[in-house]
Image: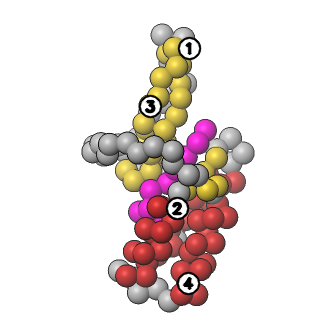
């Protein structure tokens, strides 16, 4: 499964640690999950930490290291329209859906609506 974490997840993890940091570490350690980030996500994360939270350069280098060591760099090949997503507070279980036709689903992970997983599943 491929996961792309939102900038807010990285910022939350870096500012407060806790659940968000644990989530990133858990996802990165799971052999069934591939975590990806883009240059845009990395740069936005560093910009917010620098401008809003006034992080010094040394801390920004450590933040960059967390993102780059827990994920793989991806380069988007096209842009898409942004769609507002309503809050999703529970994982949508897709495993019980009968397999026939492949579709793409967006599902929330845990209680943090900023983490979404784009996954493929098959259904009738």
Residue annotated with mark 3: 105
Q: Residue furthest right?
A: 31
- Marks 3 and 2 sit apart, C-alpha to C-alpha, by 24 Å
User: Element at badge 1?
Assistant: loop
Residue annotated with mark 2: 39
Was residue 8 drawn as part of the magenta stretch in this picture? Answer: yes
Q: How many marks?
A: 4
Taking 81 as reference, is 66 above or below it?
below
Q: Residues within 10 Å of mark 2 (few under 14, many from 20)?
A: few
User: Element at badge 4?
Assistant: helix
Residue annotated with mark 1: 99
**What mark, if any, has residue 59 been given in the picture?**
4
Q: Position of residue 52 (x, y in %)?
A: 35, 80
Q: Residues within 10 Å of mark 4 (few under 14, many from 20)?
A: some
Was residue 11 drawn as part of the magenta stretch in this picture? Answer: no
Taking 63 as reference, is 1 above or below it?
above
Can residue 23 be seen in this snapshot?
no
Q: Position of residue 18 (x, y in %)?
A: 51, 68
């Amino acid at each position: 499964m491929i996961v792309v974490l939102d900038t807010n997840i990285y910022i939350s993890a870096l500012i407060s640690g806790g659940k968000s940091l644990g989530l990133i570490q858990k996802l990165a350690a799971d052999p069934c999950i591939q975590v990806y980030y883009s240059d845009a996500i990395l740069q936005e994360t560093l910009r917010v930490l620098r401008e809003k939270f006034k992080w010094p350069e040394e801390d920004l280098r450590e933040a960059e290291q967390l993102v780059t060591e827990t994920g793989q760099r991806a380069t988007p090949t096209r842009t898409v329209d942004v769609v507002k997503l309503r809050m999703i507070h529970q994982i949508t279980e897709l495993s019980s859906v009968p397999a026939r036709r492949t579709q793409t689903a967006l599902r929330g992970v845990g209680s943090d609506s900023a983490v979404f997983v784009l996954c493929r599943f098959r259904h009738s």
